[in-house]
Structure formats: C-alpha cells, structure tokens
Image: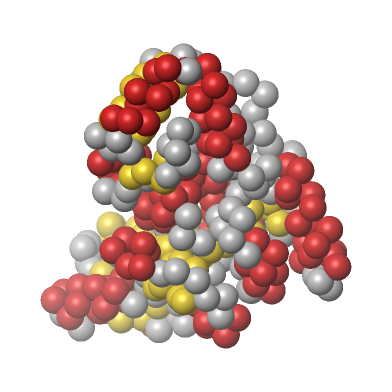
Amino acid sequence: MNDDTLLQLEQRLIEASLPFAVTTVIRALPPTSAWVGAQALVEADGALHGWIGGGCSRAIVIQAALEAIRSGRPKLLRISNALATRQADVEDHAMPCASNGTIELFIQPTVPPPVVLVLGSTPTALEACVLAQRMGLRVAAAASVTLPLAALGLLRVIEGLDDAAFAALKPQLVLVATQGDADEQALEAALRSPAEAVLLVASQRKADKLREAMRARGIAPERLAALHAPAGPSIHARTPEEIALGAVAGLVALRRSLEQVQAGGALTPDASGPLPVVRPCESMPSVASVASVASVASIPARYINPVCGMAIEMASAKYVIDYGGQRLYFCCDGCKIEFEREPGKYLAIALGTQLGETT
C-alpha cells in the first residue's frame, strides 16, 4: 500500500468516525526490513495496512496499536534484544526474529469523540448543541419541534422521542434540556437509551421530583445512578447561554472520565460509580466581561419581556437598557417606557422570569 492509498484510507475512516492508529518507524537498526519513515495503519479490528517490517514484529505492533486506540493515548515502542537503558515513556518488547534487528516506532491513535444526544429545542438546548460541537463532541438532537435544530450542522436530528433511533445512534452521553416540555418522557427515554451517563438541566428540587417520577415509571436503581442532575457545576447561571455553558462543562468532565475508565486508569477520589460526581462549586470569582455565546452561535436566544410577557430574540431586540446590573430587552418603545415608569416592579418580574428558565 503506497502513501497516497494509506492517506485515503485514513480519510475514509475519519469520515466514517471509526477509530484507528497510525504507526511510524522512527528508528531502524539492521538487520531489519523496516526503514525510518515507514508507516502502517491499524484498524480497530486489528487489520494492518502498510509496512513496518516483517512478520516478526507485526503481532507486537498490532497489539500495541489496539491498546493505544483503547486508551486514546500515543505511545513509543521499541522492539529489540539489544541492552538499553529503560525509559519510562518507551514500551520495550523483545525482538522475536532471529535477525536481532531493532526498530522503534511511534503510535498515534485517532479516536472519534463520543456522541452526545441533546433532548429539547429550548434556547438552552440550542446553545448546548453549539457549545458541545465547539468542544469537539459529535452532537445529535431530538425534539418534538426540530426546525430550530436544522441549521446547526448536527450529526443527526430526530423528531420526537424515538427509542429505536436512540438505540441506533448509541450516544455515550445524553443531555436533557427540555425545561418543561415533556420532561418526564424525555428523561425516561434518555435513561432507557444505551448512554453511559444522562445529564439533566433542572433545579435540585425539580431533579429530585423527576427522580421519584422515574422510579414510579420502573427505571431500575442502577440505571438511575447514571443520572447527573443538576447538569454540570454550579456557575450561578441565569440566561440560556450560561445554563448551557454549565451543562456542557458537565459533558466535558464526564467525557474525560469515560476516557479514563476506558484507558484502565483510576478514577478521581470523589468518584461515584463508574463516573465522577460533578460537584457544584460554592462560589465563583467575579468576571469583568464575558464574550456572548450568542454572538458566536448565530442562534437567536429568547428573553421574556417583563412588561408584556412576549418572548424576544435577544440578538435582534431594538430596545435594550441596563438597569440594576441587569440587561433588559423590550419588543417596543411602549414597553420600554412602561418599564421606566415602574422599574422596581418590572425588574422583579424580569429576575423571576429568567430564574424560572432554569427549572
């Protein structure tokens, strides 16, 4: 197999989201049929394409490549019978060939990121889809209303809570961000999916009620242990963008923990079961300014006008004022003027409305 064909195979595997490892000879001492720069690609089923020397070293290289794929970490490999100082970052193997040559190889695995399934088409769900993709995750979504999800470039958009579609998708993580739209049905579908962890966007009180509802629906205790709620660390979030940021932080933490488990490493001391508990932080430092996720995501985040109750697209709102440390959005100058007449009254309504978005 020539280099062009090897690169073409690598590209096909990347496009198909299949794991593989590329092995490159970085040192070769005769007698050996390998040469510096020789490469081979090892697929997840152990198939080797390319050339890194004769059959004597082939089995060793394949096994090392499969271990690298499983752990997601590169490794250095030396196959030799010559005496050498052991190095902590080099995996040594005896050369089984009678020729007694020496080859050293670098193995670089490519492992597709986990699939995350986001349930819901709320502003928080939309923001979470965008942020999760920016974190390198493969994101699919499911909702009763799929139009807002269509332009996000997702792996797949599923209409409704389709158990068969979820099973076929095989997500590793599910984020439930329905926030009042069929929460129980969505959470049950998430827990009955093959996902290794389910994160729920909800207040602690609501999460506790939903846990009880899941028990009543027959969800087994061991499956309920996969539920992480509230989703992610507490960052005192109020807006949909902030809530999504905290939830995606939880996804990232669980992704790395899954990788640690798959690599055979030890979990962190505060782990509970196969995955760690994402613990809420007690306080957060003040931040002078934070770039808006909405400006990057090109998704209209909604804000509830405290005067008339209308949902407004924040990015296109014409009437915006800052009052009492809060930014408020209005659909027309009439609502803005009314707010200015009784700012205390409507500021309280605005705070209550936005806090309610998190439940």
Residue at image position (17%, 80%) is: 5
The C terminus lies in quadrant = top right
Residue 235 shows up from this direction: no
Relative placement, left or right, of 198 versus 10 is: right
Q: Where is residue 140 in the image (x, y as percent from the top left)?
A: 44, 67
Q: In which quarter of the image is residue 223?
A: bottom right
Q: Quadrant of residue 303?
A: top left
Q: Where is residue 248 in the image (x, y as percent from the top left)?
A: 50, 47
Q: In the rendered picture of this protein, how many numbered marks are placed on residues? A: 0
Q: Where is residue 296 in the image (x, y as percent from the top left)?
A: 27, 43
Q: In which quarter of the image is residue 185?
A: bottom right
Q: Nearer the viewer, residue 312 or 59?
A: 312
Q: Which of 177 and 44 is in front in this view?
A: 177
Q: Is residue 54 above or below residue 322?
A: below
Q: Is residue 287 above or below residue 271?
A: above
The coloring applied to the image is: secondary structure
Q: Which of 348 and 213 is in front in this view?
A: 348
Relative placement, left or right, of 285 versus 78 is: right
Residue at image position (24%, 34%) is: 318
Residue at image position (65%, 28%) is: 281
Residue 261 shows up from this direction: yes
Q: Position of residue 245 (x, y in %)?
A: 47, 41
The N terminus lies in quadrant = bottom left
Q: Nearer the viewer, residue 93 or 30?
A: 93
Residue at image position (33%, 30%) is: 334
Q: In this view, does 96 lie above or below 86?
A: below
